[in-house]
Image: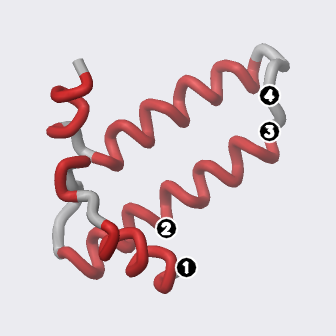
Amino acid sequence: MVLGVMYDAIPKVFNDQNENFKKLVEKGEHAQSTYNKYTTVYNHLATFIKECYHHDDMAFRKLTADFIREFDFYL
């Protein structure tokens, strides 16, 4: 199923992971502060994709070293 993930949108997968993490926070298995950091990074990533790539999402297969460097610089 790894191939399927390559076509998934980065923000969608990130958001799904955050939602799963939130459930663990609610069970007391992880810290709320960590969840808050994850949601902050998600928000920055979504804004970065909109501002720099003019899209609401981006597939993992388009994730390149340049994308990572640009996002790092953006932050």
Q: Measure the C-alpha gap from mark 1 to mark 3.
A: 22 Å
Q: Nearer the viewer, residue 44 or 66?
A: 66
Sequence-first tag of 1 and 2: 2
Q: Measure the C-alpha gap from mark 2 to mark 4.
A: 22 Å
Q: Measure the C-alpha gap from mark 1 to mark 2.
A: 8 Å
Task: Say which residue appears at 31% left-offset and 48% top-offset.
Answer: 10
Q: How many marks?
A: 4
Residue with the mark numbered 1:
75
Sequence-first tag of 1 and 4: 4
Q: In the rendered image of this protein, does residue 25 appear above or below residue 33?
A: above
Counting other residues with Cα less than 10 Å from the Cα at mark 1, is it few (<14), some (14-19), or many (20 or more)?
A: few
Residue with the mark numbered 2:
44
The secondary structure type at the circle numbered 3 is helix
Residue with the mark numbered 3:
32
Residue 54 position by quadrant: bottom left
Looking at the rendered structure, the kind of residue marked 3 is: Gln
Q: Nearer the viewer, mark 4 or mark 3?
A: 4
Task: Give x and y (percent) for residue 57.
Answer: 23, 55
Sequence-first tag of 1 and 3: 3
Looking at the rendered structure, the kind of residue marked 4 is: His
Q: Nearer the viewer, mark 1 or mark 3?
A: 1
Q: Determine whether, in the image, residue 70 is placed left or right of residue 29.
A: left
Residue 12 position by quadrant: top left
Q: Which mark is residue 30?
A: 4
Do the residues under discs 4 and 3 have CB atoms within 8 angstroms?
Answer: no
Task: Give x and y (percent) for residue 69.
Answer: 42, 77
Looking at the rendered structure, the kind of residue marked 2 is: His
Residue 34 position by quadrant: top right
